[in-house]
Image (cartoon, helix red, strand yellow):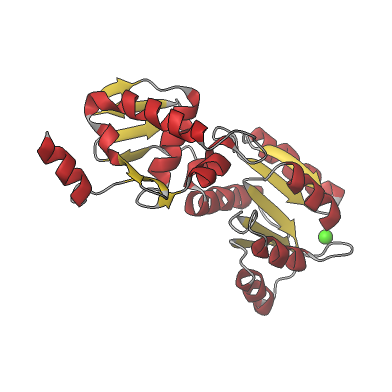
Amino acid sequence: MDMGKCTILIVEDEPAIADILKVNLSFEGYEIFCASNVANAESLIKGKLPGLIILDWMLPGVSGITFAKRLRKEKRTSNTPIIMLTAKSFEKDKIEGLNVGCDDYIVKPFSLKELKARIKAVLRRRAPALTDDAVSILGLTIYPQTRKVMGNHQEIFLGLKEFNLLHFFMTHADRVHSRSYLLDQVWGDHIFVTERTVDVHIRRLRKALMSGDFHKLIQTVRGCGYKFISFKSDCHLHNLKSKG
Ligand code: CA
């Protein structure tokens, strides 16, 4: 996953609408892929997992709603945010769209301004690692836009992978992540590196965070993976602190 630039897949069979979306969303800094039907979309997703999907309901062949159900069932796409785009405006359709796991719903004709705002809101909610918002935890702050990290008002310098790793941790704190999950989320899928790579970069990240004592926020969970903690009351952190 590229942390700096979110990829959006537009599945829309009307070329005029697809073009407007492509031009406007590219201008916003998103990387855009377009598909005019579900088969096309599936092969694009096989090549690269998008950060968000804008999905038209009425498509030739397989409908958008059927595709949304499929995406939710697949492990690889089960968490990919989906915004349904459709001319249907009946309440029961909206409910059906949300029931199959779509994150939001926009009725055509729509305003681009509204769509952009909704994309941001969905990403913030579903994939905070893809937004540019600064995140602060226990005195450590990460600024994705400027790729800067500050710990107790001192800048901390990190390599590219360590930065992405820390950003992922800080936007997904207090959960245990396996090495393979971290590889998927931080290195991107279809990347062939071993799980040892994760340990190497965790070691580098901890070393860089040591100056401000922030390395203690990254816990090794034996047999499972790693966890970034955001509560000072966490007993493990307490123990480490008292050991001095
Ligand atoms: Ca259509």
Quarter placement of the N terminus: top right
Which residue does the image show at 64% across and 57% down from the upper left? 83
Residue, far right: 61
Residue 110, compared with residue 4, is above or below; it is: below
Residue 198 visible, this orientation: yes
Left/right placement of residue 147 relative to residue 18 reads left
Which residue does the image show at 54% across and 43% down from the upper left? 185
Which residue does the image show at 48% across and 35% down from the upper left? 198
Q: Position of residue 52 (x, y in %)?
A: 63, 49
Q: Nearer the viewer, residue 6 or 200?
A: 200
Residue, far bottom: 92
Quarter of image, ligand 1: bottom right
Q: How many marks?
A: 0
Q: Position of residue 49 (x, y in %)?
A: 67, 45
Q: Quadrant of residue 87?
A: bottom right
Residue 114, compared with residue 163, is above or below; it is: below
Residue 79, compared with residue 186, is above or below; it is: below
Q: Position of residue 72 (x, y in %)?
A: 65, 63
Left/right placement of residue 142 relative to residue 96 reads left
Q: Nearer the viewer, residue 155 or 10?
A: 155
Q: Position of residue 221 (x, y in %)?
A: 35, 48
Residue, far front: 223
Q: Nearer the viewer, residue 135 or 92?
A: 135
Residue 87 visible, this orientation: no
Left/right placement of residue 164 relative to residue 112 reads left
Q: Nearer the viewer, residue 30 or 238?
A: 238
Quarter placement of the C terminus: top left
Which residue does the image show at 70% across and 71% down from the upper left? 89
